[in-house]
Amino acid sequence: MKLLPHYFKWIGIGFIILGFCMGIDDFMMGFLGVRPNSSGIYERMLPEIFARISDYPMYVGLLIIILSKSKTEDEFALKLRYESAFIVLIASILILIMVNAFNPGFKVHPGIFIVIQMLAYLIVRSVKGNVIFWDDYEEQTVLENTTE
């Protein structure tokens, strides 16, 4: 599997920050509970077109981060990557089955669902890497190669 070089993670983070900045008006209105002014409209800092397209840089940024190599990309890191993707896929299917069983009318926007899956993948991969002492693994491989 061809992956992007490690430094692309910073480019992906830049895209996420750009998308967040473009959608800051919607964030403030929804999450922080900004109220309309006396004329009944919201005062936007940026034109509305930015709010409509703000999700796309964040999607691209998450995709770039997921497709970027880690600093030490070896067979173990690739196995960890595949296992994390498999866990997220199975968990997503099980969650959808459970939600549809108890609430058949529940709808999820596909964009939100994809972002949740991407974030879950990054979290699972990070947790699995830390659980097996990722930093110690790197040191062990260096020590094993020097003792031979």
Image: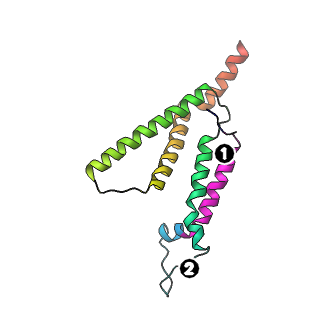
Q: Position of residue 143 (x, y in %)?
A: 69, 20
Q: Is residue 51 magenta?
A: no
Q: State the count of labels.
A: 2
Compared to 134, does 13 lie above or below? below
Q: Residue at x 61, y 55 (%)?
A: 16
N-terminal of the pair, mark 1 or mark 2, is 1
SS class, disc 1: helix
CB under 8 Å between callouts 1 and 2?
no
Which residue is pictured at 44% across the width and 39% down the height? 89
Main SS of the magenta segment? Answer: helix
Instruction: Say what secondary structure mark 2 lies in.
Output: loop
Image coordinates of residue 110 in percent, x first then y, are 45, 54
| Label drawn at residue 9 | 1
Dot 2 surroundings within 10 Å: few (below 14), some, or many (20 or more)?
few
What amino acid is at disc 2? Glu
Tell me the residue that label 2 is attached to.
Answer: 43
Q: Residue at x 40, y 56 (%)?
A: 108
Quarter of the rendering occupied by the C terminus: top right
**Tag 1: amino acid:** Lys
Q: Which residues are magenta?
A: 4-25
User: Height in image: 9 above or below 132?
Assistant: below
Q: Quadrant of residue 20?
A: bottom right
